[in-house]
Amino acid sequence: MRTIQFREAICEAMSEEMRRDEAVYLMGEEVAEYNGAYKASKGMLDEFGPDRVIDTPIAELGFGGIGVGSTMTGCRPIIEYMTFNFSLVGIDQIINNAAKIRQMSGGQFPCPIVFRGPTASAGQLGATHSQAFENWFANTPGLKVIVPSNPYDAKGLLKAAIRDNDPVIFMESEQMYGDKGEVPDGEYILPIGVAEIKREGTDVTIVSFGKIIKEAYKAADELAKDGISCEIIDLRTVRPMDHKAIMDSVKKTNRLVILEEAWPFGNVSTEITYQVQSQIFDYLDAPIIKINTADTPAPYSPVLFAEWLPNSEDVIKAVKKVLYR
């Protein structure tokens, strides 16, 4: 099996689906002539031409609306945002049109569209470029929300998203585009809504997703030196959420820590906490701990930013706390 970068996995997924289906096209800022802001569409303009790989002005509301409207004519657009921070300018098209067209048309108009781009922080980018919006979009009926953490999952899930007949929010990370991982040569598709146990364990369940899950792996390596066995679940899909995978794991370990790069109020980890305590409370041997960013806008200072963002030490402390060590 070959090893490729995250950005290459994204490019392969889009290119393969565009070869398979002429209704698929890519549109967004710098996706064509510049090969993508993060080079995730490298070479696609040369292969598919300007009618299917389309550069746009800095007008997220406009090209988002064009994408949504084009689904009504049989197209299957991929709309790339340079960052999901910029999606706020066009969020009306996502929330009030893409997510609701099927219902409001009585099922006459499905909306097979993928909105993709990086989410959350990426170093010293300041308060307006370091925000996680997974829970915002997951709060909207009609949207599916995918947040992969590695090249293999990214390719398989993006292909599934492009083929889906409902709108999908596909969230990446600027700090993962260079990550390398094994990806098969042949075609494969991963099911939306299925989490994966990345590491088997017996003492505590750690649930996470996206790039922050790397901190869970680091913590698990350190905790293993103390004889603590961590089971790590990668959600992969935030909505629909694989509750069964989480519940089955917690029934085994009896303890749960959730790691999420988002503000602490009303986020994905809050929902997981509610579902676990309401459905399998009697299996818990300790209160659930959720680890989030500080409840402030992201600071620019690297010293403050390090304090703001969750890390492996936070995970280690949380695991030891639920184990009463």
Image (spheres, rainbow, N blue to C red):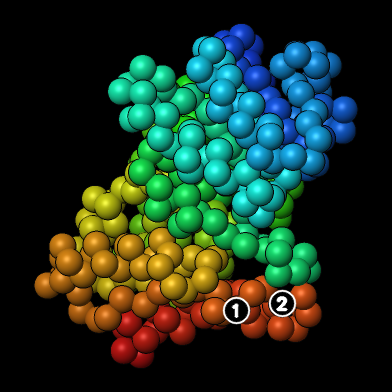
Q: Is residue 75 above or below residue 29?
A: above
Between residues 139 and 158, which one lies in front from this camera angle? 139
Between residues 129 and 177, which one lies in front from this camera angle? 129
Indicate the position of residue 124 as horizontal and vertical percent values. Answer: 78, 68
Indicate the position of residue 14 as horizontal and vertical percent values. Answer: 63, 25
Q: Return the residue at label 2.
A: 299
Q: Is residue 225 visible?
A: no
Residue lying at 31% horizontally and 76% vertically, measured from the top left = 288
Residue lying at 17% horizontally and 66% vertically, measured from the top left = 278
Asked if the residue under mark 2 is in contact with the one under mark 1, i.e. CB atoms within 8 Å, the reply is yes
* The C terminus - image quarter: bottom left
Q: Is residue 248 above or below residue 31?
A: below
Residue lying at 46% horizontally and 68% vertically, measured from the top left = 259
Indicate the position of residue 225 as horizontal and vertical percent values. Answer: 48, 77
Q: Is residue 322 visible?
A: yes
Q: Return the residue at label 1.
A: 296
- Residue 257 lies in what quarter of the image? bottom left
Residue lying at 69% horizontally and 40% vertically, measured from the top left = 60
Between residues 17 and 299, which one lies in front from this camera angle? 299
